[in-house]
Image (spheres, helix red, strand yellow):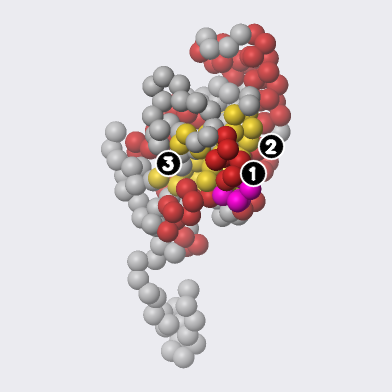
Amino acid sequence: MKKDKHTGSGIFVLSSPSGGGKTTLVRFMKKKFPDMIYSVSTTSRKPRPGDKNGHDYNFITPVAFRKGIREKKFVEWALVHGNYYGTPESNIKDALKKGKSVLLDLDVKGAMQVKKLFPEAVLIFITAPGIKELRRRIISRGQDDMKAIRRRLLNAREELRKIKYFDFLIMNEEVRDAQKRMAAIYQAELCRVKHGNTPFRLRRTTPFTKKGEGGRI
């Protein structure tokens, strides 16, 4: 895979119901655009075999996590099955200060919390062509019993109702097509003038203005 380098910065948040293929696209983006900084979530759960601190998660104690909540250090957080998960605000701000883009892998609720604090964030919803395909993918993974599968599909229906709050929708029917769309969204967003990516200071007069009219583009 050819690695691309792009200047500019932006906040990109990927969300998806179970079986939507978000993890695959996150891996693709990290490999395709190595200059992009991936936001590693913080959690209070104990590391599992194979987990690498600072790579899979930043592991801290429940006490330390609750302290971070009180001090408003998290841009989004949730309590899931007795464990805390969240995104430190510093993950985003540090990346932007370096002029880098940051990629976040969050659920729908977390994505909307980020959008509230960072309105310029680009929210991208990824899903399979339909509920039947989501169900097939979840079952094929062989990780859940039927009770868990029904719960995931119920959550998926709720998440799909939130698509209208997202900026982009990627229908992940064929992986390569989804990857192309994801890369296109990223590249197009970095070309927006709002990101301040003009490589030079424009002169006050241009070929399209008369001398004395002035004004910058």
Taking the spot 50% from the left edge, 30% from the top edge, the residue there is 22
Residue 31 screen position, x and y as percent: 34, 36
Front of the two marks 1 and 2: 1
Q: Nearer the viewer, residue 119 or 91?
A: 91
Read off the residue under disc 2. Answer: 162
Q: For the residues marked 3 and 1, what is the alpha-carbon distance in whole angstroms?
A: 18 Å
Chain part drawn in magenta: 69-73
Q: Could you tell me which quadrant the N terminus lies in?
A: top left
Q: Which residue is mark 3?
A: 38
Q: Is residue 207 above or below residue 82?
A: below
Q: Disc 1, disc 2: CB below 8 Å?
A: yes
- Looking at the rendered structure, which numbered label has been put on residue 112? 1
Q: Residues within 10 Å of mark 3 (few under 14, many from 20)?
A: many
Between 80 and 146, the one nearer to me in the picture: 80
Q: Residue at point 43% right, 82% down?
A: 204
Give me the C-alpha separation between circle 2 and circle 3: 24 Å
Q: Residue 39: where, in percent of width, then height? A: 46, 42
Task: Look at the image and tell me whether residue 195 can be seen.
Answer: yes
